[in-house]
């Protein structure tokens, strides 16, 4: 959650920019981005929306969860720590060669497994949360 006036303004601006991107696209990509955004907010209540890299919606909680990029033929969701996430529904279909990120490319007409995607969003947020918790000091023997 934003803690300063500047951060709060940035969150509002990011949400407005994402709204504008969805409206600007005006096609299936905008509809898909709006759908993915809704699913993210349902899965990770209070998720922070940011706007980075000159026009990329990013969802964060204790670090980046994923991006929502739009291209001519695909809407791409890139998970910052995707390689560390279990993917039993096999949603990841792009950027599989790296050892950090994983992505999901969605093309027009592709089905979206909403429950599996929400589970992936939750798992990515939980991974960030676990990394953000301070480590307990161990006692010397």
Image: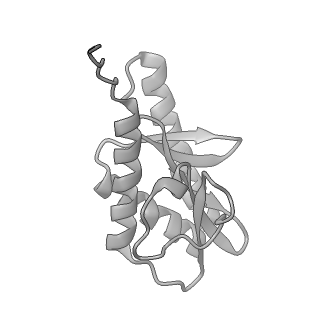
Name the residue rendered at 39%, 26% in the picture.
2
Q: Position of residue 16 (x, y in %)?
A: 51, 43
Name the residue rendered at 45%, 58% in the picture.
85
Classify 132 as above or below 87.
above
Task: Please identify the quarter of the rendering in which residue 23 is found.
Answer: bottom right
Q: How many labels does the image show?
A: 0
81 and 6: which is toward the camera: 81
Name the residue rendered at 49%, 19% in the picture.
6
Classify 104 as above or below 6.
below
Q: Where is residue 14 in the image (x, y as percent from the top left)?
A: 52, 39
Quarter of the picture containing the C terminus is top left
Q: Residue furthest front?
A: 141
Question: Which colour style is shown?
Answer: one colour
Taking 37 as reference, is 41 left or right? left
99 and 60: which is toward the camera: 99
Q: Where is residue 39 in the image (x, y as percent from the top left)?
A: 36, 62
Taking 141 as reference, is 59 left or right? right
Q: Is residue 59 visible?
A: yes
Classify 21 as above or below 109.
above
Name the residue rendered at 29%, 57% in the picture.
42
Q: Where is residue 95 in the image (x, y as percent from the top left)?
A: 66, 64
Quarter of the picture containing the N terminus is top left
134 and 25: which is toward the camera: 134
Q: Can residue 27 be seen in this view?
A: no
């Amino acid at each position: 959650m934003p803690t300063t006036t500047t951060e709060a303004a940035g969150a509002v601006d990011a949400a407005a920019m994402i709204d504008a991107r969805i409206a600007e696209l005006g096609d299936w990509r905008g509809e898909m981005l709006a759908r993915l955004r809704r699913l993210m907010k349902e899965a990770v209540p209070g998720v922070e929306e940011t706007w980075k890299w000159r026009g990329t919606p990013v969802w964060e909680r204790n670090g980046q969860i994923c991006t929502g990029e739009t291209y001519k033929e695909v809407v791409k969701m890139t998970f910052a720590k995707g390689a560390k996430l279990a993917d039993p529904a096999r949603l990841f279909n792009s950027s599989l060669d790296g050892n950090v990120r994983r992505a999901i490319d969605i093309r027009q007409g592709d089905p979206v497994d909403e429950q599996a995607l929400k589970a992936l969003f939750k798992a990515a947020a939980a991974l960030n949360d676990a990394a953000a918790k301070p480590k307990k000091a161990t006692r010397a023997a």
